[in-house]
Image: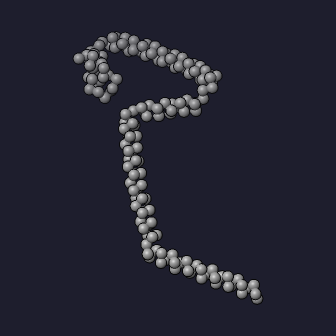
């Protein structure tokens, strides 16, 4: 049971952390004044050591980061290249997932079905237009438009001839 409580101590809102905090407070309250002072001194020393280690690690990390940046600069690796490479790798990883492959398959199938439907619609429209073109009423309209065009053409020739002869 002890291991279970310590495993959840990192989450202060967990019941294990609350129980552990209560146990620590109870143990601390049971100590004598000298023991309390001694514990506080130990904790203060340990805290100072941990903070010193953290600062050392930050310094080492900053140094390593600068060194890595220098090496990347020497190799010609720019931030843009890194971002591009990361994006390309992310896209590659995404394309390898089964969800993406299933989605791509569904979209391809849907596209093919849509193309088939539009193909049959355009085929039907072409057929209807062809039927209309060959219909008696369309021939009658074409004849009327044709004769009207010929009349306008003749009138414009006459008008040009009259304007020249004046």
In the rendered image of this protein, does residue 161 appear above or below residue 64?
below
- Of residues 131 and 71, the one nearer the viewer is 131
Q: Is residue 66 visible?
A: no
Q: Position of residue 59 (x, y in %)?
A: 54, 18
Left/right placement of residue 119 relative to residue 15 reads right
Q: Is residue 163 visible?
A: yes
Quarter placement of the C terminus: bottom right
Instruction: Tell me how many marks there are.
Output: 0
Q: Position of residue 82 (x, y in %)?
A: 55, 29
Residue at 51%, 32% in the rendered image: 88
Residue at 43%, 59% in the rendered image: 122
In the rendered image of this protein, does residue 123 appear above or below residue 27?
below
Residue at 38%, 49% in the rendered image: 113
Quadrant of res 126: bottom left
In the image, farthest residue toward the bottom: 166
Q: Position of residue 114 (x, y in %)?
A: 39, 51
Left/right placement of residue 135 relative to residue 74 reads left
Quadrant of res 6: top left
In the rendered image of this protein, does residue 147 appear above or below residue 66?
below
In the rendered image of this protein, does residue 38 appear above or below residue 88?
above
């Amino acid at each position: 049971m002890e291991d279970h409580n310590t495993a959840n101590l990192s989450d202060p809102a967990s019941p294990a952390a609350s129980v552990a905090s209560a146990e620590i407070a109870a143990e601390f309250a049971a100590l004598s004044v000298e023991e309390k002072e001694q514990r506080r001194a130990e904790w203060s020393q340990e805290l100072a050591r941990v903070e010193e280690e953290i600062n050392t690690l930050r310094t080492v990390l900053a140094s390593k980061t600068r060194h890595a940046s220098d090496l990347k600069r020497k190799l010609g690796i720019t931030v843009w290249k890194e971002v591009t490479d990361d994006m390309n790798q992310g896209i590659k990883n995404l394309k390898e997932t089964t969800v993406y492959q299933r989605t791509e398959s569904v979209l391809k199938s849907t596209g093919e079905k849509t193309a088939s439907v539009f193909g049959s619609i355009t085929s039907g429209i072409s057929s209807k237009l062809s039927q209309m073109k060959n219909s008696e009423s369309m021939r009658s309209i074409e004849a009327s438009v044709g004769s009207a065009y010929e009349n306008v053409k003749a009138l414009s020739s006459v008008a040009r001839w009259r304007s020249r002869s004046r």
